[in-house]
Amino acid sequence: MDAIEAKLAALGLTLPAAPSPGGNYVPHRINGDTLILAGVISARDGAVTHAGQVGKDQTVEAGYEAARVCALNTLAAIKGALGSLERVREFLYLGGYVNAVAGFDRSPQVINGASDLFVQLYGDAGKHARAAVAVAGLPRNATAEIQVTVRFT
């Protein structure tokens, strides 16, 4: 177990299996020292953990937890691509999408569920540029989806 996985365990979290693509795409691309990951939804072991729209079916707090599930899936995808979470030098970008009702303006608070976990695990290297956008729907009616780009060694 590497140091990042030990930090996860200390938080009472476990790394899921890396998610499989849900369509005609690859889970990641590597360009030099940059890893570009496909988007991942709030699902674990093939089942959606948080479904529906924030502001209707889910609270902001439940959306935060959904984004945290997305972050765990992203970490699993990073480990699958690089072999170790310790190879991450820094998180560059996080695109966050929140399945929400029309006019929902708290997407940043929801996507903080992912951002906060990356900073807890990686410190300043976990900080990233970010978008947090409310959308009318996501694959499988998931509550959240994130897409991440990292630099690695």
Image: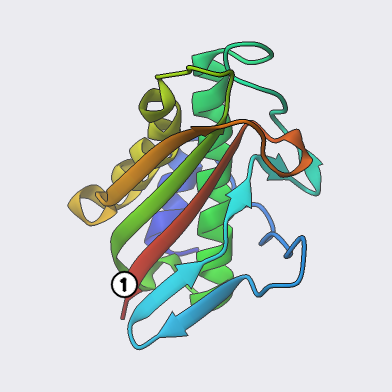
- Measuring from the top left, give residue 44's x and y in whole percent: 72, 44
Q: Compared with residue 130, is residue 79 higher up or lower down, i.e. above or below?
A: below
**Between 128 and 54, which is closer to the camera in this rendering?**
54
- Measuring from the top left, give residue 2's x and y in whole percent: 44, 64
- Measuring from the top left, give residue 4's x and y in whole percent: 40, 56
Q: How is the image coloured?
A: rainbow
Q: Residue furthest left?
A: 124
Q: Secondary structure at mark 1?
A: strand
- Measuring from the top left, give residue 11's x and y in whole percent: 45, 36
**Residue type (three-letter) at the residue carrying disc 1:** Arg
Left or right of residue 17, residue 126 in this image = left
Left or right of residue 124, residue 119 in this image = right
Q: Which residue is mark 1?
A: 151
Q: Residues within 10 Å of mark 1 (few under 14, many from 20)?
A: some
- Report the residue at 78% width, 48% height from top: 45
Q: Residue furthest front?
A: 102
- Report the residue at 31% width, 72% height from top: 151
Q: How many marks?
A: 1
Q: Compared with residue 124, is residue 60 higher up or lower down, i.e. above or below?
A: above
- Report the residue at 64% width, 40% height from top: 42
Determine which quarter of the picture holds residue 115: top left
**Between 66 and 39, which is closer to the camera in this rendering?**
39
Q: Quadrant of the C terminus?
A: bottom left
Determine which quarter of the picture holds residue 55: top right
- Report the residue at 57% width, 56% height from top: 39
